[in-house]
């Protein structure tokens, strides 16, 4: 073998967003003809460094070289010109155009008169899908496609660019196992042609199969770059988890006596996901939902909250079968959902803290057609105090608050409805560690006050800190119910180490659920 | 997958809705042809009149299809057409027909670039930019013309821009056919058209794909103002004068024509042929309702009702 050439060399990359250091002096080197896995937990900086590489973000410090050449400027165009292609997790598809039109957008073939030759795009798209041995109709509108087909379109778009560097950011989340296998076959072909491939995934089994080397990031720092041969799954998980659990270690779990069954699901299925999920949530209990992106956790939350009503199965609250057909039904039954996408589903950013806080209880505080402003103020002030929301005043726009405080406003808004069942979907995404532990503490307090709480989180340390039981999900199905206590290793006395040990164990269970899914499907 | 089974029938259904404008046009035409046969509806002169009366709307609607497809809107077209009739008439008086045409094009370019600059660089939504421009253009037209009609004494200009005909075919019909054909190909087959549809269909995705979306929006707004200026030039030629009232209120008919033709107000979807048929349909309805002898008040109600029904039927669910 000749000396491998660095297709990508990123040196000393640092990047901050509003005072938060997302990347701190990170190096990343990817060789020609290798599949390089990029690993790390949520907030480790994977997406940020990829966005620096393809020009969406410009680095505060450091240099980016592609094939030995410094990038001309931090723009997507410059990166593309240098031969960097990336799939954007459905971000780069126009729903109103067809698959073929999307794949070749801005790079359409022209006929003799200089007009776009869509027939040629269709042929070439067909050829790509044929090569991948997947079935996607190039004539279909992207807006009509399911998640898996969209993902294949994204991948086709990225590989159609004949790139020197191909970045695949979680390409397999919505793909069937067989499609992933074909993608891998194709990636090996590209590799043989000397293309450098950066592969991001949370699935260790995939990484182990496809990658040659891996770089692991944690908290915006480079941890290790090593050949896969030196990285056992356990080692990888250890590097990913690290010792960052401080901040949660001091959350007192408090002993709660499990009360009556509050929410019971019997073989519940949603319109797309989840499939046939059953569990019981008791009063005073925090139940966690663990799993990777696309495992059906959020879909399950949407079913319970009436956003995508169940199509099969039975939901009972307080032992009584209920029909939840709309969010209003759910609210009436005492269910509140703190949704995943805070900015669009949780708050109205331009409205004041007070207006946001009372949004879900407007009916209750309206008298004679007018909103009782005194009551609205009382509710808001009570929530601001209870959740220690840091805001200049109740009349300031929510958009002026930090992410953590915005999330507290969303939680306050739903607590104002005085729900029995509170569902939190990724409640700590994108907020600082201080607010994170405050929110986890609040979850414990709510459970102690006799409510039932359902928590969805991709941060395992958070789930382990907050929950009494954890349901592991994969591919829309409930895989296994774990008792939090069973994940503890008795001899470990240092709470930080104990949490890490438990996190590793939970991580292994999640990975197992994926392979179990393959077994049932295969 | 369960979806695959229902896909073909759903496509047919969607196609039926997509084609409602053409079906509707034929149905309404047939109804009028039967019920109004004794009132001269099918008289070639009457039919060509419909074309003459809708030509300006159609010209503006062709460009509006691009604006709406890019996810923007232009409310200033009617007022810009009116302003252009005045600038053209005044320029012809001092510099002859060529000077007049130059003045008309300059008016369109100036307004369009100002609209585009405010929308893409300052960041004012095009709805507001062009709403303000509607008032400004009308005000300028009134001011420079002293609210009086400016006569055009150039037969050549009047022939080419609106008044003339080649044998039995009015020049206006030629304008529509040429611009319509061109617009249709540009929107559906050119790189520019594809970028317009991508910008309106998903701006983030378009940007991530390397499309300069601000530039595209700038271009469609300039295109729209230039089309409005051309419509103004046609008004001026047809009526042999420039007056600020010409084109007043046209923006609503123009947007209605595009939407009737299947162009989405939310961007990403549009066809120029559909728009032209939409414009013709509005002209057809106006003409038919007049021949029916309805009063103006009744015409307004009937026209509004027909447009609502057509658009409601075309909604994809």
Image: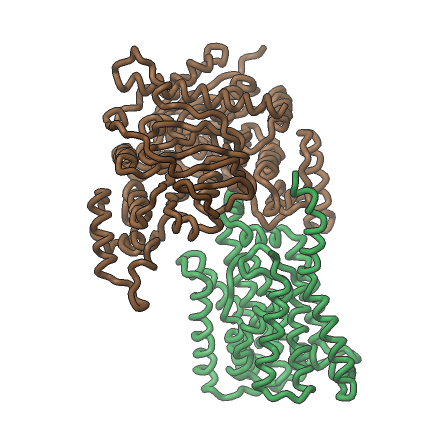
Q: Is residue A313 above or below residue A197?
A: below
Q: Please give left or right for residue B15 compared with residue B263 in the image.
A: right
- Which residue is depicted at the point 70% across and 82% down? B49
Where is residue A86? Give x, y as percent: 53, 34
Q: Number of numbered discs present?
A: 0
Residue B191, given in percent of the width and then of the height, sits at 62, 50
In this rendered view, identify the residue nearer to me: A392 or A2. A392
- Viewport quadrant of the C terminus of chain B: bottom right
In the image, residue A322 sits, relative to residue B233, either above or below, namely above
Tell me the quadrant of the picture where the N terminus of chain B can be found: top right
Residue A430 showing in the rendered view: no
How far across and down, in percent of the image, does residue B161 sit?
A: 65, 77
What color does chain B have in the rendering? green
Relative to the observer, which residue lies in front, A518 or A158? A518
Q: Do we see residue A473 in this rendering?
A: yes
Q: Which chain is brown?
A: A
- Depth check: give the residue in front, A156 or B105: A156
Left or right of A491 in this view: B268: right
Q: Residue placed at 24% from the left, 27% from the top?
A: A252
Give the percent coordinates (x, y) of residue B18.
Answer: 67, 59
Residue in the picture at 24% in, 61% down: A373
User: In which quadrant of the rendered view does residue B31 lie?
Assistant: bottom right
Residue at (52%, 62%) from the top-left corner? B221
């Amino acid at each position: 073998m000749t000396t491998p050439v660095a297709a990508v060399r990123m040196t000393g990359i640092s990047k901050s967003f509003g005072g938060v250091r997302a990347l701190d002096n990170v190096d990343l080197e990817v060789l020609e003809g290798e599949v390089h896995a990029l690993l790390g937990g949520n907030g480790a900086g994977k997406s940020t460094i990829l966005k620096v590489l393809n020009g969406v973000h410009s680095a505060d410090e450091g240099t980016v070289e592609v094939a030995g050449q410094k990038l001309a400027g931090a723009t997507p165009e410059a990166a593309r010109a240098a031969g960097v292609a990336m799939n954007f997790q459905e971000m780069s598809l126009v729903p109103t155009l067809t698959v073929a039109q999307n794949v070749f957008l801005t790079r359409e073939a022209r006929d003799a008169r200089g007009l776009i030759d869509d027939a040629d795009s269709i042929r070439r798209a067909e050829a790509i899908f044929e090569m991948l041995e997947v079935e996607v109709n190039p004539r279909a509108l992207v807006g009509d496609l399911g998640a898996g087909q969209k993902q294949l379109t994204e991948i086709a778009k990225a590989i159609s660019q004949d790139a020197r560097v191909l970045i695949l950011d979680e390409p397999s989340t919505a793909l069937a196992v067989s499609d992933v296998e074909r993608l891998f076959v194709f990636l090996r072909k590209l590799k043989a042609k000397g293309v450098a491939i950066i592969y991001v995934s949370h699935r260790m089994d995939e990484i182990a199969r496809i990658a040659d080397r891996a770089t692991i990031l944690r908290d915006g720092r480079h941890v290790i770059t090593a050949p896969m041969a030196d990285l056992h799954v356990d080692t990888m998980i250890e590097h990913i988890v690290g010792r960052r659990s401080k901040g949660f270690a001091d959350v007192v779990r408090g002993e709660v006596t499990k009360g009556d069954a509050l929410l019971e699901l019997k073989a519940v299925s949603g319109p797309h996901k989840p499939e046939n999920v059953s569990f019981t949530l008791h009063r005073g209990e925090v139940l966690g939902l663990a799993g990777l992106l696309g495992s059906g956790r959020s879909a399950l939350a949407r079913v319970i909250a009436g956003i995508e009503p169940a199509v099969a199965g039975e939901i009972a609250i307080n032992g009584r079968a209920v029909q939840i057909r709309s969010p209003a039904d759910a609210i009436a039954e005492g269910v509140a959902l703190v949704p995943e996408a805070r900015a669009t589903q949780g708050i109205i950013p331009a409205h004041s803290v007070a207006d946001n806080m009372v949004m879900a209880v407007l009916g209750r505080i309206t008298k004679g057609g007018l909103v009782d402003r005194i009551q609205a103020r009382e509710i808001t002030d009570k929530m601001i105090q209870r959740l220690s929301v840091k805001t200049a005043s109740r009349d300031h726009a929510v958009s002026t608050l930090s992410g953590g405080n915005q999330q507290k406003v969303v939680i306050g808004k739903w607590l104002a409805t005085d729900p029995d069942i509170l569902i939190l979907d990724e409640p700590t995404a994108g907020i600082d560690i201080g607010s994170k532990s405050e929110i986890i503490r609040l979850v414990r307090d709510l459970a102690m006050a006799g409510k039932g709480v359902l928590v969805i989180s991709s941060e395992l340390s958070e789930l382990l800190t907050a929950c009494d039981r954890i349901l592991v999900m994969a591919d829309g199905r409930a895989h296994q119910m774990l008792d939090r206590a069973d994940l503890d290793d008795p001899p470990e006395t240092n709470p930080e180490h104990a949490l890490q040990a438990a996190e590793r164990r939970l991580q292994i269970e999640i990975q197992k659920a994926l392979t179990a899914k393959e077994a049932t499907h295969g | 997958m369960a979806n695959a089974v229902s896909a073909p029938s759903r496509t047919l259904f969607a196609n039926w809705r997509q084609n409602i404008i053409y079906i509707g046009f034929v149905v309404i035409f047939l109804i009028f042809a039967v019920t109004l046969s004794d009132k001269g509806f099918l008289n070639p002169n009457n039919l060509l009149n419909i074309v003459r009366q809708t030509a300006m709307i159609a010209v503006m609607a062709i460009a509006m299809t691009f604006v709406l497809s890019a996810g923007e809107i232009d409310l200033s077209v009617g007022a810009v057409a009116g302003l252009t009739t005045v600038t053209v008439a005044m320029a012809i008086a001092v510099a002859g027909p060529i000077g007049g045409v130059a003045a008309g094009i300059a008016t369109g370019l100036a307004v369009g670039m100002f609209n585009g600059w405010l929308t893409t660089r300052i960041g004012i939504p095009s709805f507001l930019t062009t709403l303000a421009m509607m008032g400004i253009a009308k005000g300028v037209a009134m001011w420079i013309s002293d609210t009086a009609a400016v006569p055009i004494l150039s037969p050549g200009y009047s022939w080419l821009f609106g008044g003339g005909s080649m044998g039995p075919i009015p020049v206006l019909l030629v304008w529509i056919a040429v611009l319509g054909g061109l617009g249709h190909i540009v929107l559906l087959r050119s790189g520019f058209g594809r970028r317009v549809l991508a910008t309106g269909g998903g701006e983030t995705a378009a940007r991530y794909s390397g499309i300069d979306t601000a530039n595209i929006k700038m271009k469609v707004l300039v295109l729209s103002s230039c089309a409005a200026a051309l419509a103004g030039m046609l008004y001026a030629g047809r009526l042999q004068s420039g007056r600020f009232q010409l084109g007043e209120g046209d923006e609503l008919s123009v947007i209605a024509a595009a939407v009737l033709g299947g162009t989405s107000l939310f961007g990403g979807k549009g066809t120029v042929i559909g728009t032209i048929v939409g414009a013709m349909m509005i002209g057809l309805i106006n003409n038919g309702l007049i021949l029916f002898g309805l009063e103006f008040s009744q015409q307004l109600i009937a026209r509004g009702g027909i447009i609502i029904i057509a658009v409601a039927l075309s909604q994809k669910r």
